[in-house]
Amino acid sequence: MWKLRSIFNLLLLCSAVTLVAAQGSTNTTSKWQTLKGDAPLVIARGGFSGLFPDSSFNAYRFAGLTSLTNVIVWCDVQLTKDGVGICFPDIKLDNASNVATLFKDKQSTYLVNGVSTKAWFPIDFNFKELALVNLQQGVYSRSSRFDGTVQPILTVEDVFNKVQPPGLWLNVQHDSFYSQHNLSMRAFVLSVSRRVVINYISSPEVNFLKSIASRINPKVTKLVFRFLGNDETEPSTNQTYGSLLQNLASIKTFASGILIPKSYILPVDTSSSYLQPATSLVRDAHKVGLEVYASDFANDVPSAFDYSYDPVAEYLSFIDNGNYSVDGVLSDFPITPSGAIDCYSHMGKGQKNQVPELLVISSDGASGDYPGCTDKAYSKAVSDGVDIIDCTVQMTKDGIPFCMGSVNMIDGTTAAQKFSNLAVSIPELKTQNAIHSFDLNWNDIQNLQAQISNPFAKFRLFRNPAAKNEGKFMTLDDFLTFANATSVSGVLITIENAAYLAEKKGLGVTDAVLLALNKADLTTKKVMIHSNDSSVLMKFTNSKYERVYGIKEDISDIQNSTILEIKKFASSVIIGKPSVFPTEDLFLIGVTNVVAKLQAFKVKVYVQLFSNEFVSQAWDFFSDPYVELNSYVFGSGANPLDGVITGFPATANRYRRNRCIGYKETPPYMLPVAPGGLLQLMSTQYLPPAEAPYPVLTESDVVEPPLPPVAKIAPASNNTGSAPGPNSRPSGQSAITASISMISMCILLAVLVIS
């Protein structure tokens, strides 16, 4: 046990930081709209059950080490045959333990709330037998790699004495069931309360709470009535919980608070998964003197689309909405509400940026909320506080440069519905059955619908379906004009496939970008030119442009000589997340020195791609995009990162403005994670399989031959069935390589002189 405690401290204290000494939240910027004006409580359901087996020592201890210092740990109390009270998440033991393997012949069938249920029940075991049972992860979508660690079932006294939590909450879910089997939950609770400090006792059964109300010291222990589903029946009164909700004053006679599913407060439309108008429940309960605790919070369970998979945004809608605040939240991931309460609440639009050197760069605009590279996505990114908006430049058949995240039009448009006959595979571009932008005229593309990206559709995680086809595509000229008229600091222009376009299609994408930039006159904006091809960056010799080299492969290290070579054509780089924190089976195994090396050579480092969906993050980040961002920004090198690239700029912007970064003493929920720390809590046979290390980036990897000249290709027939675009030539050749107007020629000559 003491070894476990030292491991947990190693996990968290990855820098010499003293934990915040004050109890609870240090956020005093505004009076909370809770019943008594105090900060909301965090209740850790079964400890940190979002990662570790529910109700295990590891889960309870980790909750205490990563949360607000007044965190309350939750114990679902079950009774054994000999009357011992244990902490276990379900009345069915086989859901979260190996009991079925150890006691194959002890399965039974009982009525539970009137339903015949076949399982392994605690009433069929004495505690001595259950001492052999090991806790396991009961939610199959979560990692089972901690199941091999010895994690015995804990008694209520074990949790109090061994874990020593700041507060303890006992939930009595099935008093009637135990009474039917001659076991008294009332007797146990009253007995244990003389040996253990219990801060909260909840139950969905009215009679149970009434039976102990006169025997419990209200100055020590609060009684909380737990509401189940609206249509479920409360066994004592034979009324539905929905009907009991209509008489809150009667509940106040035997309880000081209510615990309700979060949907009672902010309902979610079951057909669309969007929020409905908030109910008045919290304010109604506060009026009669009842505290309100909201349940069912878990970072890895999709909630309403309104939150854009941002768990902090969801918590804030319950605790900091300007109208009310719940008095506490019950969560499987207590680190997230701890941060929401102390770091992100009551921020306001004028909240100071705590990491001014960190740039927030969009990925196809706010592509997590709208179809990428559309006016809607770019406008949303600007309103979300992005610094740099990005445009990956593609070329049309008639030579129009425009913004699109991929050369394959199937990825972000409805092209497959109209131009399936144009689908081809091009090995040089690594595309298969793709409809390429250079096979369509600009008019063709304008007539397509945008299509939102769903990179995690295989997990049934979809983005903002109400806006899945909203937005209009933008030419590069339109994009630059838009950027010039906004508050953004600058633009990131990405150029890809330049050699192929020049040699095989007669399209000069690099020249097109230079021409557009000169026309736009972005004198007040930062201009970043990004490419994976060093020969492209060599074409941009104007010192006002920041040249950004994209390291397209994930790497484990980079040679000093390679960095010196990169500095010949770029002053900054973009790397992928695995080049910072490599993983095995989505567990961090360490941190590379790539960022530290690059920064030591005065090369700026931007990391991509950050998404809010929890499946995009390593287990070590607890399904919390803010923990991930914080770990990359402050845990990847000696200095903070220079920038992050994301399709959810609102999340990154909120992160860098949180007040906890500015605290003199960093709270535990704002510490970078310790890479490889979770591996120490796994038994050897449960460790993820080792994977081959990423390669080291060498000089030869970054040196490219010069770009080929733009070929003069005979015009092809217009087989798309549309008229040429507004800037196309009758020949179908690029407007840049063909004869152009005198004004454009003057601009082009100016470009050549500058270069």
Image: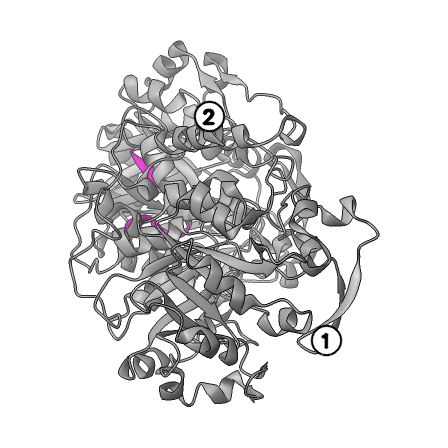
Q: Is residue 211 visible?
A: yes
Q: Which element carries disc 2, helix, strand or loop? A: loop
Q: Is residue 551 visible?
A: no
Residue shown at 29%/33% (left/top)? Answer: 642
Above or below residue 546? Residue 339 is: below
> Is residue 646 located in the magenta-colored stretch of the structure?
yes
On screen, residue 345 versus residue 49, left or right, reads left
Residue underneath mark 1: 115
What kind of residue is marked 2? Leu
Q: Quadrant of residue 311?
A: bottom left
**Which label lies toward us, 1 or 2?**
1
Colour pattern? one colour
> Is residue 706 located in the magenta-colored stretch of the structure?
no
The percent position of residue 383, horizontal first and vertical second, equals: 28, 60
The percent position of residue 392, horizontal first and vertical second, equals: 43, 44
Is disc 1 surrounded by few (<14), some (14 to 19) or many (20+) residues within 10 Å? Answer: few
On screen, residue 357 versus residue 201, left or right, reads left
17 or 368, which is in the foreground?
Answer: 17
Is disc 2 surrounded by few (<14), some (14 to 19) or many (20+) residues within 10 Å? Answer: some
On screen, residue 375 versus residue 272, left or right, reads left
Q: Which comes before the other along the chain, label 1 or label 2?
A: 1
The percent position of residue 118, horizontal first and vertical second, equals: 77, 64
Residue underneath mark 2: 707
Above or below residue 71? Residue 214 is: below
**Which range is magenta?**
642-653
| Quadrant of the rendering where the C terminus is positioned | top left
Residue shown at 61%/62% (left/top)? Answer: 721
